[in-house]
Image: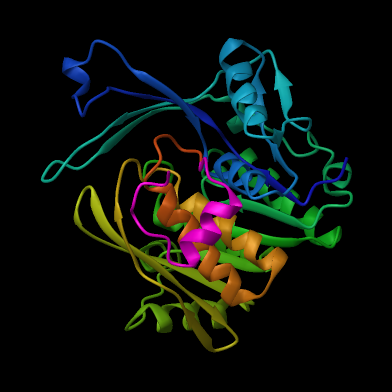
Amino acid sequence: MSFDVVTFGEAMIRLSPPNFMRFEQANSLDLKVGGAELNTAVGLARLGHSSAWVSRLTDNPLGRLIANHARAASVSTEHVVWTKDDRVGVYFLEFGAAPRASSVIYDRKGAAIANIKPGTVPWAKVFAGAKWFHVTGITPGLSASAAEVTKESLVAAKAAGLQTSIDLNYRVKLWSPAEAGKCMADLMAYCDVLITTEEDIERVFGIKGKNYEEAADLTAQRFGLKIIAITVRENPLVWKNSWTAIAYQQGNILRTKTYEVEIVDRLGAGDSFAAGFIHGMLTGDLQNALDFGVAMSALKHSIPGDFAWLTRDEVEAMLKGGGLRISR
């Protein structure tokens, strides 16, 4: 079958101590599944789009666990590449509360996705009939071969006539700013929509503007980008933030509502923004995309785990000014 949206990248198993405990005092760990591109595919599936996630997974109970979670959220895994080799990545999340920040420990070295090779995925078949392709800067940071396949996928997506989006999503624990900058600058030639933060633009591309708007303009000029979306977070407390975004298109800046969010779990919020934004672009215009992306990601902050277990009706109610009274 063909899909509205295809994403490509890593997913891992997430383990966290309950009730804000430190790892050193924990007796049990809560298990979730997440990964930037899979989270985005899930968000789009929840909004009613047919979505597929492409990756490479080890054919063992942990790999099958990840695939099961994807399918449970209505995301197709038919183009996942299975291998008997390598392993599944794991990350350990310790929730903090002000003044102690949350922290992550990665155990992903040698994961199956890092050893994916060009020519492994039949991209022409994957993209047949599809409308949109989404990747992030996490995947090419995993290994040189993963970077090659990321470029291969974007080239194939453009050849197939898809719209493409890249979430810059810089991870300091994966690669240096110089390494990321060189690789991601090369990928911008195949990008229609860049999703990022002002901080990542500066760290990866060395671009610093007087404000968000100038940073977007300078980035668009350097790479010839059509659209740039910049998410904006202010976090005076670990569990209470303000959240909004701007969108840039041909010198024009669009804005949307700012939400005050009480955070249950912020992981996956940026991926939910990407999902809502892509949904808005597929069903309307750029303002619709910005509004929907910010509203959906604001709601995601209230949900445990990486996945946005939301419906389109819930996001649309939020856009209409839904209140905090109990729904009954």
Q: Is the magenta stretch mostly helix, strand or loop?
A: loop
5 relative to 105, above or below:
below
In which quarter of the view is residue 242 placed? bottom left
In which quarter of the view is residue 220 placed? bottom right
Picture coordinates of residue 22 (x, y %)?
Answer: 18, 24
Which quadrant is home to the N terminus? Answer: top right
Left or right of 170 on screen, residue 159: right
Q: Is residue 180 magenta?
A: no
Residue segment shown in magenta: 308-328
Q: Observer-nearest residue: 81 or 68?
A: 68
Picture coordinates of residue 41 (x, y %)?
Answer: 63, 44
**Residue at 65% of width from left, 59% of height from top?**
279
Q: Is residue 318 magenta?
A: yes
138 relative to 104, above or below:
below
**Residue at 17% of width from left, 41% of height from top?**
97
- The answer to whether residue 179 shows anywhere in this view is no
Which quadrant is home to the C terminus? Answer: top left
